[in-house]
Amino acid sequence: GAGVSQSPSNKVTEKGKDVELRCDPISGHTALYWYRQRLGQGLEFLIYFQGNSAPDKSGLPSDRFSAERTGESVSTLTIQRTQQEDSAVYLCASSRGFQETQYFGPGTRLLVL
Amino acid sequence: AQSVTQPDIHITVSEGASLELRCNYSYGATPYLFWYVQSPGQGLQLLLKYFSGDTLVQGIKGFEAEFKRSQSSFNLRKPSVHWSDAAEYFCAVGGGNAGNMLTFGGGTRLMVKP
């Protein structure tokens, strides 16, 4: 597609429920990233996929967070047993490869009640 | 560990005035540096980037930034601000030993007075 797309754009859930956030990267981009942006703050790196290599999970805040990517296409970020502190905008980005410019999607705004 | 500091949380300038947004970074190698802009309800848009070469980088929308290694800075400038420039601006550093992750500053919110 023309840009990175994410769905849903907004998600409201109850504490303790699981959520799945989806990211469609730019076609042909081998690298995909997830970031979290809490209200009024900068972005925090969560996880990075590059081709078929093992993902860099160093930014995941707890074992409730996980992500998958099928080949060089769609990625899903899953948050299990959501907590109120998980409320944030979750941003996905993709790039053509290692250390190339990252292009961001519009984000998914998650609110945990 | 790498870090980015944007000392100004909020800045207000008059339309037509010049603008400088500050960014200081901490990094153990030659950094890759970026400025992104985020308008309300929109995703991040890349304004410009520095990988190597000329330390004065031109970007979109009339923005430029200068990499100063001695000061560990990468300040964003624009000679004449337009009302449509009102947004949040993020400086980021990446590359080298840190791999591919970007580390972002906390952002500077720019307001433009008519």
Image (cartoon, coloured by chain):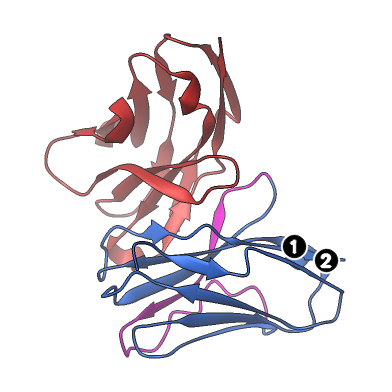
Chain colours: A blue, B red
Residue plotted at (60% across, 46% down)? B41
Q: Disc 1 is attached to a residue of which chain? A: A
Q: CA distance from mark 1 to mark 2?
A: 6 Å
Image position, residue A90 (x, y; %): 60, 64
Residue plotted at (35% across, 59% down)? A102
Residue plotted at (53% across, 39% down)? B39
| Magenta-colored segment: predominant secondary structure | loop
> Dot 2: what SS?
helix
Where's the N terminus of chain A, which quadrant? bottom left
Q: Disc 2 is attached to a residue of which chain? A: A
Image position, residue A69 (x, y; %): 45, 86
Give the label on residue A84, or none. 2
Looking at the rendered structure, the number of numbered marks drawn on it comes to: 2
Tell me the crowding category of disc 1: few under 14, some 14 to 19, or many 20 or more residues within 10 angstroms, Cα based.
many
**Vertical relation: B51 (above or below) A105:** above
Residue B40 placement: quadrant? top right
Residue A108 placement: quadrant? bottom right
Is A48 inside the magenta-drawn segment?
yes
Magenta range is A40-62
**Vertical relation: B51 (above or below) A111:** above
Where's the C terminus of chain A, which quadrant? bottom right
Pick the residue in front: A43 or B88: B88
Give the label on residue A7, or none. none
Identify the residue position indicated by label 1 in the image: A87
Give left or right: position of A61 versus B90: right
* Farthest residue, direction left: B53
Q: Tell me the amino acid under the disc marked 2.
A: Gln
Q: Tell me the amino acid under the disc marked 1.
A: Ser
Image position, residue A39 (x, y; %): 70, 49
Dots 1, 2 in contact, CB < 8 A: yes
Give left or right: position of B83 versus A100: right
Pick the residue in front: A81 or B2: A81
